[in-house]
């Protein structure tokens, strides 16, 4: 008897597939090198999508992905090429989503390494190649965009051979846009990528490499069965979180979902188990059966760790409950960002959020504003500092307003990263100057080809999260690319700079900066606020301070009413008497007055990139 089906759901199919007829492969490349376009051509050639329903970036499900032309969430699909089933995973290319790429590679035996024939090897190309090599995967290298007038396939193939050790003769050449060479790529995948070698008779071990939330059916997980067999009546045990659940539905994506009765070792599909929280079925989780558990979970599980922190506040304070609900719903689809309530004296009630990187922060904020119709202010991005107090206690702080008083602090450590930058050699000097002004220290400089060089710098993460990418792109006319990895913590001479209005600290403008840049930051913020804060009935001093020491000051001058205008002559004492009376009134107003800072001033002062 078939399992109970949901309304309008295709019937469950009994499928048993030979492992020799399966190929599991992911597409990896630098951002904007044509991964999603190549996936489109593969879907067309394999007949997976009705031509009438075909659209660009078919696997990208979010409007935001289509508008920006980037992949944010990985997508998987099963394609039929002759007698062979190719399980394809289209991965994100941006460094912020590198964790999704690493989990995808754990579900594969091979990768398509896609390189733009007009741009050559980029930073993410190298990073993703090293990930593939660490996972001992077969690499099928291919040059894309050979139809472009600026394409130099021979030079790029030589560069791949020199840098990655893949013979230039084995590098395939194709155009994902026109479809040229894509059929040959599919044949190469079948010939060169080994089939999976899982043991069907062993206890079930299945890897979750992605999850998303469906509001009607709960968490839908993308899984790869490593060993054993997963059936529609299995009772499952999630090894990392220690929870049990029954199977509601298993199946494969073609790309539309097609339920099946079993998924055997080597197969890729999806699982619906009635889970209501993506955090219980995160990427990297190992699934086994309750009554026949695997001896150990699969290797490589780790929590994605937030790198960048920012406060999100509703412009209208009445929208705070709506923002809280929106964050809860969005976290069901993206468990890699964190949030917790916080209060700001200047901005009111909001949330402190942690993100994987700057692009991830932009995406989350834009989704909140677009999908939930919210208007938000985000504070300047910061990183997590490790502070050793005078009594020996160690605390972690990601909000500058939480930093203890300076006399209680023994030392402050900040996170460092190891950045790899690939650039045309013309811009080497400009980039070295940029890295050194951001407190970077060079670790390696290597010429990939006579025209292109790789620079490796160790630098503080805090120097990168503000506008480093923008500066790098502007100095190299957009030709440089960057990838980075965490490189631990190191002690630095850091100080907390407070901005005072009328002698009162405004927590939204507080920042942790290196002592050598504290004066510059204080001056810039004071001048910016002087332009943004409207004139009051009294002088408003804007001060930047380190502890109790003032390091910069600007003054918003008061309105001045001409109280002597009605005088038409007479003794000068009458004029002085009126001016004195006005002065006393303003002094009293200053002592009881509160500075009126409009919301627009906060938005402008905290705007990213300014």
Image: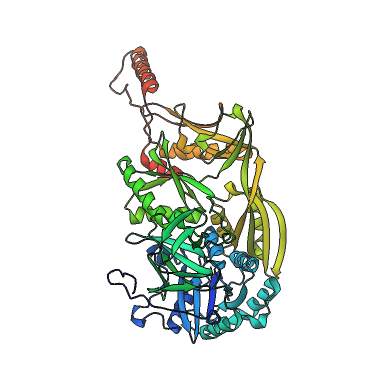
The reply to whether residue 256 is in sight is no
Residue at (59% x, 84% y) in the render: 191
User: Would you say 599 lies left or right of 161 here?
Assistant: left
Give x and y (percent) for residue 123. 61, 64
User: Would you say 515 lies left or right of 374 here?
Assistant: right
Q: How is the image coloured?
A: rainbow
Q: Quadrant of residue 125?
A: bottom right
Name the one closer to the observer, 64 or 453.
64
Q: Where is the N terminus found, in terms of image quarters? A: bottom left
Residue at (57% x, 66% y) in the render: 106
Residue 581 position (above or below residue 374): above
Give x and y (percent) for residue 175. 52, 81
Name the one closer to the observer, 272 or 296.
296
Residue 591 position (above or below residue 506): above
Residue at (36% x, 24% y) in the render: 593
User: Would you say 256 lies left or right of 106 here?
Assistant: left
Give x and y (percent) for residue 462. 58, 46
| Residue sticking out furthest to the bottom | 82
């Amino acid at each position: 008897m078939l399992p109970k089906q949901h309304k309008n759901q295709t019937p469950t199919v009994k499928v048993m597939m030979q492992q020799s007829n399966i190929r599991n492969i992911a597409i990896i490349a630098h951002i904007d090198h044509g991964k999603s376009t190549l996936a489109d051509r593969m879907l067309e050639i394999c007949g997976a999508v009705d031509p009438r329903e075909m659209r660009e970036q078919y696997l990208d499900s979010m409007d935001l992905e289509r508008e920006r032309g980037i992949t944010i969430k990985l997508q998987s699909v099963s394609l039929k090429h002759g007698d062979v089933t190719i399980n394809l995973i289209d991965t994100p290319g941006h460094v912020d989503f590198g964790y999704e790429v690493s989990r995808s590679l754990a579900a594969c035996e091979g990768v398509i390494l896609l390189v733009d024939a007009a741009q050559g090897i980029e930073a993410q190309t190298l990073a993703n190649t090293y990930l593939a090599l660490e996972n001992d995967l077969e690499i099928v290298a291919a040059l894309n965009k050979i139809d472009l007038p600026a394409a130099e396939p021979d030079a790029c193939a030589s560069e791949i051979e020199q840098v990655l050790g893949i013979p230039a003769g084995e590098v395939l050449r194709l155009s994902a846009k026109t479809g040229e060479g894509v059929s040959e790529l599919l044949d190469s995948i079948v010939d060169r990528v080994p089939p999976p070698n899982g043991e069907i008779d062993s206890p079930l071990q299945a890897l979750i490499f992605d999850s998303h939330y469906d509001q009607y059916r709960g968490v839908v997980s993308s899984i790869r069965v490593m060993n054993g067999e997963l059936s529609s009546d299995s009772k499952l045990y999630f090894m990392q979180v220690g929870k049990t659940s029954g199977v509601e539905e298993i199946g494969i994506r073609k790309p539309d979902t097609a339920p099946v009765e079993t998924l055997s070792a080597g197969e890729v599909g999806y699982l619906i188990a009635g889970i209501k929280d993506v955090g219980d079925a995160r990427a990297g989780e190992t699934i086994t059966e309750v009554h026949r558990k695997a001896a150990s979970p699969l290797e490589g599980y780790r929590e994605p760790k937030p790198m960048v922190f920012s406060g999100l506040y509703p412009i209208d304070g009445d929208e705070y409950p709506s923002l809280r609900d929106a964050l809860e719903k969005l976290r069901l689809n993206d468990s890699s960002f964190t949030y917790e309530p916080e209060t700001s004296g200047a901005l009111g009630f909001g949330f402190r959020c942690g993100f994987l990187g700057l692009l991830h922060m932009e995406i989350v904020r834009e989704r909140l504003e677009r999908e939930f119709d919210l208007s938000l202010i985000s504070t300047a991005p910061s990183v997590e500092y490790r502070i050793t107090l005078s009594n020996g206690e160690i605390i972690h702080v990601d909000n500058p307003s939480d930093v203890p008083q300076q006399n209680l602090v023994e030392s402050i450590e900040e996170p460092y990263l190891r950045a790899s930058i690939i650039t045309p050699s013309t811009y080497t000097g400009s980039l070295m100057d940029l890295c050194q002004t951001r407190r970077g220290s060079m670790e390696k400089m290597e010429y990939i080809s006579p025209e292109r060089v790789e620079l490796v710098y160790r630098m503080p993460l805090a120097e990168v999260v503000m506008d480093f990418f923008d500066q790098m792109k502007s100095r190299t006319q957009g030709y440089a690319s960057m990838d980075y990895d965490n490189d631990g913590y190191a002690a630095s001479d850091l100080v907390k700079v407070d901005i005072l209005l009328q002698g009162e600290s405004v927590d939204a403008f507080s920042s942790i900066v290196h002592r050598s840049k504290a004066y510059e930051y204080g001056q810039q913020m004071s001048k910016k606020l002087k332009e943004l804060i409207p004139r009051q009935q009294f002088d408003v001093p804007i001060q930047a301070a380190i502890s109790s020491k003032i390091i910069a000051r600007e003054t918003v001058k008061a309105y001045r009413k001409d109280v002597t205008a009605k005088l038409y002559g007479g003794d000068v004492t009458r004029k002085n008497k009126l001016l004195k009376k006005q002065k006393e009134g303003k002094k009293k107003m200053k002592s009881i007055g509160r500075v009126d800072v409009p919301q627009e001033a906060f938005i402008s002062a905290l705007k990213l990139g300014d």
